[in-house]
């Protein structure tokens, strides 16, 4: 038997013989092909013996695709997307449908040069494979250093795009290399470039240079300038990562363009002046290939993305799929009109609104009935193609996040009647304020949530803990949000981004009585032969909140939408974000959930100096008065054909009257003080004992201390105090609640006698004189006695001010005044005055 080395030598000789025979037929590129075959054999030898290596080579290269097929491509079948009622929404362009094949002469030389400089500098000199780049890419993989260019030539990329799959394997790379050599043998460089630039994918359904030029700049490929060509050349490597339309990747696309321009300058395709001009050029994007009659374009885009993930782009592009979606095209038109009309209201335009979005969900199934991702899909100025509803990483939800905090609170023994302290200040060392920069003090959780007070929500997150609240949010559907303790207590009021698709669907959990259905957009998919690939089936959903907790949250949120003057029952929550970047309104009832948003956006990132806040001298865009108007229009239109439907209160709830501060069963003490709250509690979590915090005590009206047994009745008042138990958090104590006294008042025992200011005399028009005494005492004056002209019996005893008498007796008089306090051992204060009362004037009769 031959040795392993002998087999290897024999395999190499066979390869060399075959290569020499083919060289006689076509000498062009044979050295390169020999090198490919030899390297292939040497590589496969490492996997086994020499004969085995050659056998693997023959296996890999057997039944390769015919490169002549590049000249005549088989027609693909279109994918069609329908709404839930069979209305055609969109026909997915096949490769032939969206690709406009043009000769190389109809493509800007700038794009040709940019593509070659970026993708394959040695394109015009190699024969399909650039061995230096292959080795360089391999070394880059080994050393983890990024190569200036990948290992694949333009010819190899053409093979991968048209004849092979994207599978990462040795077999595929060998096939790719062999086919690349064959293409170089059969086609000229101009033909290869023409094929490549008509085939390559540029994102946004654009295949080929002509489609790309129309998609991004609404012009022919031949008219592209240097800056535009450089941008397009940089996209195919990773279209989703270098998408200039997407605000999240706009900067990356710009950086990629600069890399291309530097490559063009390096290769002397442009001058330094042309480079500077291109760098400073502000590109104007305009999509000239959009189907202007597409129904629900944002929804269609999301469907296509979903299908791509599930079946792969090639199947979606040419597989003839028939897709039935959840969309209601009639409701979609209503939603689009509601968004567009309200975004363009003059009063909201004055407050810097230029964009809006809405989504309509069936809470019983999670099916998306309408999706409006912007105010105008075709408005490049606002980035209209960018879908606010589905795009990552999402947007901050503001106070609409509070549903997760309160759902957690009500699931852990707290109820709407429990209290919190709405007092601005520092919490855990961080300052927090309310949206109106006011403090309301001790308020119930019902009031705190319905009025969207910030401080109570933050205190609840602190009290309940991050883990509990974030777990509730995830169970309700916020699976993509980066909720971590490191981001702080501000997350209670929406400091972490959420994807609206998930956030709005969480409100569907409340609408559906605590049961979650994941967002659903596709009902059925069949292939070109009518075979069902996937089909939606009803499910019971997943219970994530108890029916009682969901009902409590819904009940608390019913007053929020009152400014909209909608007569039918619904609950809602608003939200505004820091610096007023976003304004939210999410309203719902048992039948429907409508999430709405307003903001100010630009294509990509708004340039420096452009105000993107919804706060101007004209005012602020509050949820109910901005996106709430979108909700109102959609809700009223939908409800017009529906019966009135409200939530039925589930079993397991009990209405209880409690004392406000303690949350314990009400007693006469808190009732008499007007400190009771009547609200609903989850059965089993109702207070189980009478209140003992409220204390009714008798106090002296003089100093507020406890009344003694001998304190005169007229100096006693009853007062109610709240006595907090040990360890009760200071932030939950009412700041205006006085401490209950422990000492007895000294009105009967004080030793400091009263005093009397000088008596005041007032002459009356009828001749009488009024004498006023002003006594003073540390505690209280018991009475003031008035003695006239040395009499022993007072003419007046006055026990409550004002202390004064009026004398009308004509003639001179002396008046003595004595003021007593309640301690009989203290001497009275004495005052004296003399005065004369004139006799009344008697008019004389006329003679």
Image (tube, rainbow, N blue to C red):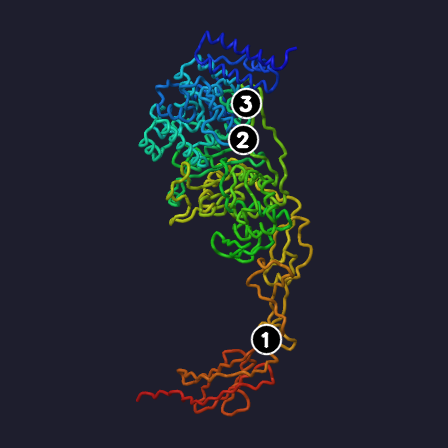
> How far apart in space, not on screen, are marks 2 and 3 (Cα)?
29 Å
Foreground residue among 427 and 182:
182
Q: Secondary structure at mark 2?
A: loop
Foreground residue among 147 and 154:
147
Q: Mark 1 or 3, which is nearer the eye?
A: 3
**Residue for badge 1:** 714
Q: Secondary structure at mark 1?
A: helix
Q: Mark 1 or 2, which is nearer the eye?
A: 2
Foreground residue among 490 and 651:
490
Mark 3 surroundings within 10 Å by alpha-carbon count, few (fewer than 14), some (14 through 19), many (20 or more): few
In percent of width and height, residue 778 lies at 55, 79
**Is residue 336 in sight in this rendering?**
no
**Is residue 649 in sight in this rendering?**
yes
- The reply to whether the C-beta atoms of the residues labelled 1 and 2 are less than 8 Å apart is no
Left/right of residue 268 with respect to residue 420 in the rendered view:
left
- The reply to whether the C-beta atoms of the residues labelled 2 and 3 are less than 8 Å apart is no
Q: Quadrant of residue 820?
A: bottom right
**Residue for badge 3:** 167
First reached walking from the N terminus: tag 1 or tag 3: 3
Q: Quadrant of residue 822?
A: bottom right
In percent of width and height, residue 743 lies at 63, 73
Left/right of residue 149 with respect to residue 476 in the rendered view:
left
């Amino acid at each position: 038997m031959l040795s392993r080395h002998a087999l290897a030598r024999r395999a190499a000789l066979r390869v060399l013989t075959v290569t020499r025979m083919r060289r006689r037929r076509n000498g062009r590129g044979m050295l390169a092909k020999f090198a490919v075959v030899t390297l292939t054999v040497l590589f496969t030898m490492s996997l086994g013996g020499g004969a085995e290596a050659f056998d693997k080579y023959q296996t890999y290269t057997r039944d390769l695709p015919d490169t002549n097929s590049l000249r005549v491509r088989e027609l693909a079948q279109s994918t069609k997307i329908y709404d839930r009622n069979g209305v055609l929404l969109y026909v997915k362009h096949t490769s032939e449908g969206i690709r406009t094949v043009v000769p190389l002469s109809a493509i800007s030389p700038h794009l040709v040069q940019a593509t070659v400089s970026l993708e394959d500098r040695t394109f015009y000199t190699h024969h399909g494979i650039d061995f230096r780049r292959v080795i360089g890419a391999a070394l880059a993989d080994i050393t983890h250093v990024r190569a200036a260019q990948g290992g694949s030539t333009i010819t190899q990329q053409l093979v991968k795009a048209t004849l092979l799959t994207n599978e990462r394997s040795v077999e595929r790379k060998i096939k790719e290399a062999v086919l690349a050599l064959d293409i170089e043998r059969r086609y000229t460089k101009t033909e290869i470039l023409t094929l490549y630039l008509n085939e390559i994918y540029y994102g946004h359904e654009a295949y080929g240079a002509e489609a790309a030029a129309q998609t991004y700049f609404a012009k022919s490929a031949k008219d592209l300038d240097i800056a535009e060509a450089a941008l397009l050349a940089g996209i195919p490597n990773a279209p989703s990562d270098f998408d200039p339309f997407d605000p999240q990747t706009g900067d990356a696309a710009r950086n990629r363009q600069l890399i291309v321009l530097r490559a063009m300058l390096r290769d002397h395709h442009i001058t330094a002046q042309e480079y500077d001009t291109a760098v400073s050029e502000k590109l104007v994007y305009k999509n000239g290939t959009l189907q202007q009659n597409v129904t629900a374009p944002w929804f269609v885009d999301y469907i296509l993305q979903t299908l791509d993930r599930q079946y792969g782009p090639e199947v979606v592009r040419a597989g003839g799929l028939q897709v039935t979606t959840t969309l209601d095209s009639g409701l979609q038109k209503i939603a689009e009109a509601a968004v567009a009309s309200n975004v363009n209201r003059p009063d909201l335009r004055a407050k810097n609104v230029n964009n809006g979005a809405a989504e309509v969900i069936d809470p019983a199934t999670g099916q998306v009935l309408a999706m409006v991702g912007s105010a105008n899909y075709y408005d490049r100025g606002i980035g209209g193609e960018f879908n606010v509803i589905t795009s990552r990483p999402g947007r901050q939800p503001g106070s609409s996040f509070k549903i997760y905090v309160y759902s957690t609170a009500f699931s852990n023994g707290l109820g709407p009647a429990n209290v919190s302290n709405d007092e601005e200040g520092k919490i855990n060392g961080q300052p927090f304020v309310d949206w109106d920069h006011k403090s309301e003090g001790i308020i119930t959780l019902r009031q705190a949530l319905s009025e969207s007070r910030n401080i109570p929500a933050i205190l609840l997150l602190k009290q309940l803990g991050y883990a509990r609240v974030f777990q509730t949010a995830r169970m309700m559907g916020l699976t993509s949000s980066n909720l971590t303790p490191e981001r702080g207590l501000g997350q209670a009021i929406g400091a972490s981004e959420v994807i609206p698709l998930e956030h709005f669907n969480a409100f569907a959990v409340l609408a559906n009585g605590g049961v979650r259905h994941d967002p659903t957009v596709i009902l059925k998919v069949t292939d070109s032969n009518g075979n069902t690939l996937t089909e939606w089936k009803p499910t019971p959903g997943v219970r994530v909140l108890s029916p009682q907790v969901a009902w409590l949250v819904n009940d608390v949120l019913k007053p929020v939408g009152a400014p909209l003057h909608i007569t039918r029952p619904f609950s809602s929550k608003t939200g505004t974000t820091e610096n007023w970047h976003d304004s939210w309104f999410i309203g719902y009832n048992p039948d429907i959930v409508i999430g709405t948003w307003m903001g100010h956006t630009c294509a990509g990132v708004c340039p420096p100096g452009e105000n993107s806040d919804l706060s101007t001298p004209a005012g602020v865009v509050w949820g109910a008065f901005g996106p709430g108007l979108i909700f109102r229009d959609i809700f009223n239109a939908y409800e017009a054909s529906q019966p009135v439907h409200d939530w039925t209160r589930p079993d397991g709830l009990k209405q209880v009257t409690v004392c406000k501060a303690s949350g314990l069963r009400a007693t006469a003490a808190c009732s008499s003080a007007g400190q009771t709250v009547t609200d609903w509690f989850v059965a089993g979590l109702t207070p189980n004992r009478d209140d003992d915090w409220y204390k009714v005590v008798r106090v002296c009206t003089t100093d507020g201390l406890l009344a003694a047994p001998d304190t005169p009745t007229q100096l006693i008042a009853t007062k109610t105090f709240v006595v907090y138990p040990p360890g009760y958090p200071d932030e939950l104590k009412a700041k205006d609640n006085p401490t209950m006294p422990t000492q007895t008042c000294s009105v009967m025992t004080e030793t400091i006698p009263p005093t009397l200011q000088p008596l005041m005399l007032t002459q009356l028009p009828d001749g009488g004189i009024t004498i006023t005494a002003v006594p003073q005492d540390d505690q209280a004056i018991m009475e003031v006695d008035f003695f006239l002209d040395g009499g022993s019996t007072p003419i007046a005893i006055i026990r409550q001010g004002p202390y004064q008498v009026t004398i009308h007796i004509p003639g001179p008089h002396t008046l003595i005044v004595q003021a007593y306090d309640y301690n009989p051992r203290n001497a009275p204060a004495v005052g004296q005055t003399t005065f004369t009362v004139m006799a009344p004037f008697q008019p004389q009769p006329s003679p």
